[in-house]
Image: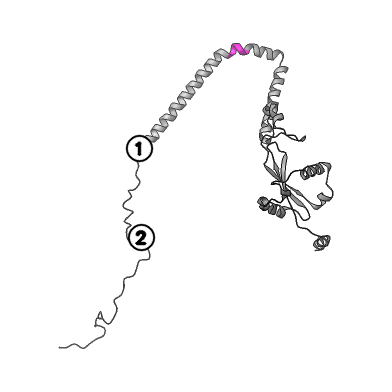
Amino acid sequence: MIRPFSPLTAMPSSSSAPSPKPKRNPNPNSNSPNPNSGSLPPCKHSPAATLDLLILLLVLFSCAFLIISSLAHLVRTLSTVLPPLLRPLAASFHDAPLPYLAAIIVLLLIGATVAAAELSGAARPWDWPFWPRRRCGNPRCRGLRKALEFDVQLQTEDALRSPPDAAAASMWKEIDGLPWKGGQQGNNPDYECLRAELRRMAPPNGRAVLLFRSRCGCPVAKLEGWGPKRSRRQKNKESGR
C-alpha cells in the first residue's frame, strides 16, 4: 500500500531548506582549554627557597652574635680603663662644676649655629676665613657660597612713582645701573623669548626685571620687560565696574 503524503512526516531535503549553523561560543576560553596554559607548570614549593631562607637566618644570627660579643668586649675593656681616668675628672667637676657646664653650653651653641647655617643655606662658620675671597667689589655683598643664578623683581606703577622706603629705592637704583644681558641696550634678539615672558609677568604700567646673579648673590646683569600701558580713563572705567 502507498501511504498518503503527510507534511509532518516529510523530512526536509538539503536543497529546499538550509541546514542550521552551529552557534558560536561567545567566550571560547570558557569551554575550550587554552593550549598555552598547559605549558606552564603550576607553582610548587621549591626546596631551594627553603634552603635560601635557612642560610639567611644563619647569617643574621651569626652577625648578631659577632656584634654582641664585640660590644661586650669593648664594654669590659672600657670598664677597666676609664675609671682611673674619670675619677680625677669627677672630683674636679664636683669641686667646680661651672667651667664644665659653660663648656657644654658653648658646644651646644656651636652645634645649633652650624645646624642653622646648614638649614638656611647661608655661609657656613668654617668658611669664614674664605669670605673675603668670595666677596666682590659690592659693599653690600653677602659673600654667599652658592646663590641663585637669577631672580625676578616686579615694580608696580606706584613703586615707580614713589618707592615705599629707602631700601627699595637704593635697590632699584642699583638695578638701573646694571648692564644689559647680551648688550645692545637690552635689545639682543637672542633673549627675545625671555623679554616676552617678562612682559607677560609685568604689572600694568610697571616692569618685570630678570636679574642674573653671581655665586656670591650680587646681581651682574639684567633683562626687563614693561607691562601693558593703561591710561587713567581705563583705570577709572575698571574701578567703576
Residue behind mark 1: 48
Is 25 left, or right, of 77 in this rendering?
left
* Vertical arrangement, residue 59 with respect to residue 233, above or below: above
* Vertical arrangement, residue 59 with respect to residue 92, above or below: below
- Residue at the (68%, 43%) spot, across then down: 150
* Vertical arrangement, residue 110 with respect to residue 89, above or below: below
- Residue at the (80%, 52%) spot, across then down: 157
Q: Residue furthest front?
A: 184
Is 225 left, or right, of 5 in this rendering?
right
Residue 158 position in % (x across, y down): 82, 51
Is 92 left, or right, of 158 in this rendering?
left
Indicate the quadrant where residue 175 lies: top right
The front one of 189 and 121 is 189
Label 2 element class:
helix
Does the magenta stretch mainly form a helix, a strand or a loop? helix
Label 2 or label 1, whichever comes before in sequence order: 2
Q: What residue range appears in magenta?
A: 82-86
**Mark 2 Cα shell of 10 Å, populated few (<14), some (14-19), many (≥20):** few
**Mark 1 Cα shell of 10 Å, populated few (<14), some (14-19), many (≥20):** few
